[in-house]
Amino acid sequence: MHGRIWLVAAVCGAFLLCADGARAGEGRNVPEAVEQAEALGKAVNWASSQARDSVVRVSSKREISIRPPTMPDDIRRRLQRQLPRGRTIPRELGETRNITRRWSGSGIILDTKGHILTCNHVLSGAEEITVTTADGQSLNATVVGTDEFTDTAVIKVEADGLKPSTLGDSEDLYVGQPVVTIGWPDGLDSAVSFGVVSALHQRFGAAPLEDFVRFDADVANGAAGGALINLRGEVVGLVAARMDGGAVATSVEQPVGPGQGASSPGFPAPSGGAMGGPVPQGGSGGPGFAIPIDVVEDILDMLKAGKPVERGFLGIYGKLITADIAKDLGYDSRVGTAVEKVMDGSPAEKAGLQKDDVIVSANGKELDNFQQLRMMLARAKPGDVFTLKVWREGNRRTIEVELGERPTR
């Protein structure tokens, strides 16, 4: 009994000493830079608190069949000659087996009706989808709409008390802007990471339509489908990938048995061109990439309604105006995009666009490259009219084009 009293007294004394030390520290001359850094930390804490409950884990599962390897015919014939008559060597070395594949990523709650935004590759052809909320609810989800062109998808759950996110404006993003990522790293609860926007309008061949925001905050496996937010707590991007030698998605393929490692189904190296199969990866790595929320908002109503996404179609191939191309064309500027080819029967051909035209601006917006025009078209609808300022052989003209519907492939 006396020992317990002594222990309590000792702990209380130590606490009072620490408290006195803390109070004494308050009188120290803390540099203004330290106070500013602490203020930034508090800003990050506040911003993440505004959005953290709106980010969920998205787990998906599907059954796949794995066929056994096949023995080459020449080796099989050679071995077959050594066997007694009547015995044969099978072509397939084993039996087809079914296994369960599980993936884990993140998602962003859009409204109280249960719509959740995520990346299309997180679903990975899932047959079952489970959503885990910040307060621990485990909910079954169904796919409502998907768009492979931008790697976006909307799923839906039935639940009360969901906290919708606040969507911001990615058009206002600038290089150097502080941003925060929120996601569910593999095997852990939701986590935040702080960094800055390092580049805008990035593309590396991961999806047909790309206009990525590049940022330097840590992106762990399981973060795909999570939120990129500004310091106001507004979602300005959908976290999609990171760069680890090649661009990879950051949903995680979870082990389903002893000795089976984790991998990330997603983006191949830039030369691959489109989203592919599982790519082995570590836990985190290079810079992250997010789909601008403005690009998502343009198609959100269609995704929620389960309708095919309609996009405007011009019908040209464009190229960057390099110094050599400008010289060949006799063009005294680097502004705009050069028309490399006009598709037969396209809205561009009907409107009179020609090869080697330079499209200087579209709807009053000056163009730096073809990517800008592609994304403007992707955010337009069939039937919209685009006003193009065009340079042709030293003369400038205005051409109006009524957009068609973008082919599915």
Image (cartoon, rainbow, N blue to C red):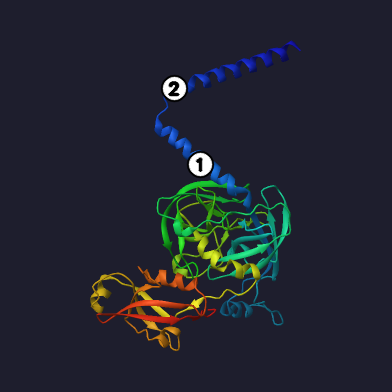
Of residue 291 and residue 265, the one placed in the foreground of this image is 291
Q: CA distance from mark 2 to mark 1?
A: 24 Å
19 versus 149 height, above or below: above
Of residue 176 and residue 390, the one placed in the foreground of this image is 390
Question: Residue lying farthest right?
Answer: 1
Residue 175: x and y in percent read: 40, 54
* Left or right placement of residue 98 versus residue 366 in this view: right
The residue at 69%/47% (across/down) is: 135
Of residue 41 and residue 206, the one placed in the foreground of this image is 41
Residue 347: x and y in percent read: 45, 84
- Picture quarter containing residue 394? bottom left
78 versus 162 height, above or below: below
The residue at 52%/47% (across/down) is: 193
184 versus 62 height, above or below: above
What residue would you read off at disc 2? 28
What residue would you read off at disc 1? 43
Of residue 380 and residue 327, the one placed in the foreground of this image is 380
Say which amino acid is labelled 2. Arg
Count of all numbered marks drawn on residues in the image: 2
The residue at 56%/70% (across/down) is: 148
Residue 333: x and y in percent read: 26, 71
Picture quarter with the N terminus: top right
